[in-house]
Amino acid sequence: MKIITIVTSLFIFCMTFALAQEHDHDKGEHSHHEMNDTLDEVNEGFIDPKGTLVSILVEGMVCDFCAQSIQKVFMKRDEVVGISVDLDNQNITLALKENTDIDNDVIEELFLDAGFNATEIMRKKVNS
Amino acid sequence: MFLRILLLIYFISVSYGAFARPVSYPEGWTFMTKNNEDINSAHIHYSPTSKYSLGYRIQNFKHKKYQLHALHYNHLIKRWNKKHTQANFYTKSGIGIAYSDYENYDSKKKIGGYIGISSDWETRRYYVSYENVYSKSGNFDDYFKQKFKVGIAPYIANYGSLHTWVMLEVDHNPESKSSIRYTPLLRFFKGTHMVEAGISNKKKVLLNYIVRF
């Protein structure tokens, strides 16, 4: 009985990660990361009309809890005045204060610290 | 009388049960309670980083009539982030004091502890998880059990909206006479709150609750 239990456990465990790999392989999609030109409101905070929008493509952001953790981490930053979450496109948009920016390396590190991967980062001025 | 009031407060507090990822975001707190046919438990933990959490967990074993108070440690061994999926592999462990005021174990205290692994895989539509635990509490108890859970979201909710999952939880306790228990359940979450409610094939209620802050 114990052998059956152990084998079953290992099987389920392996299947879990096999499914993860297969699902992404089947998608076979290339990212189409584009800035959202129509963004006029955010989930938290506000958009500084003289500031910058930073659009980030995120891997692993599959649920509200995931996005909430990212939101909490970035809203602690002085440069960030607002954040928008797009779960459909795995996209986070940060609204930055006027005359501020965050280096890509820092953004990638913050995502890693939060448990996610930032794969593409784009910027534009709010009123450009 | 005072003891009864304390027990009443305790059981009310844990009657809103819980389940979720064992590690939160950096500097995040999580409170969860979990209630089923066998156990009422309450657990609070703090995550200094997204890799591990430390907390305090109390489990009340209803049939075996003892409680285990433990310092609890969760560790994220590996996370797989993909564009549409995330998978995780954790270890969970705890060590503390088991005590019983009942029957054969009247007023006895023993060192107790447990260790196990858990894994999950999810998309916005599908969810699969597995976890097991080996627990030993002095001469009160000694068991191994495992749990498998699958779920599907009937609709894809936007960020901040009410999310709903239809799930099936299968518990396997090799030592029990009827070692397999099936519990269909509904999971709801909105904002930082999550509730799971279901009824097992033994007609027993499952009720879990979690909040992050």
Image (cartoon, coloured by chain):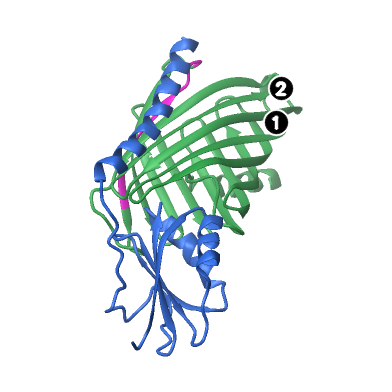
Chain colours: A blue, B green
Residue B201 location, x and y as percent? 33, 28
Going by the numbered disc 1, the residue's amino acid type is: Ala
Q: Quadrant of the N terminus of chain B?
A: top right
Residue B101 location, x and y as percent? 70, 30
Determine the CA span between mark 1 and mark 2: 7 Å
Disc 2 marks which residue?
B138
What segment is highlighted magenta in the picture? B164-175
Asked whether the beta carbons under mark 1 and mark 2 sit within 8 Å of each other, the answer is yes
Q: Secondary structure at mark 2?
A: loop
Residue A63 location, x and y as percent? 38, 54
The answer to which of B163 and A96 lies nearer the viewer is A96
The image quadrant of residue B166 is: top left
The answer to which of A91 and B95 lies nearer the viewer is A91
Residue shown at the point (40%, 22%) measured from the top left = A11
The subunit carrying tag 1 is B
Relative to residue B24, is residue B108 depicted above or below?
A: above
Q: Quadrant of the C terminus of chain B?
A: bottom right
Going by the numbered disc 2, the residue's amino acid type is: Gly
A62 relative to B106 in the view: left or right: left
Disc ID at residue B98 = 1
The image quadrant of residue A84 is: bottom left
Residue B96 location, x and y as percent? 72, 35
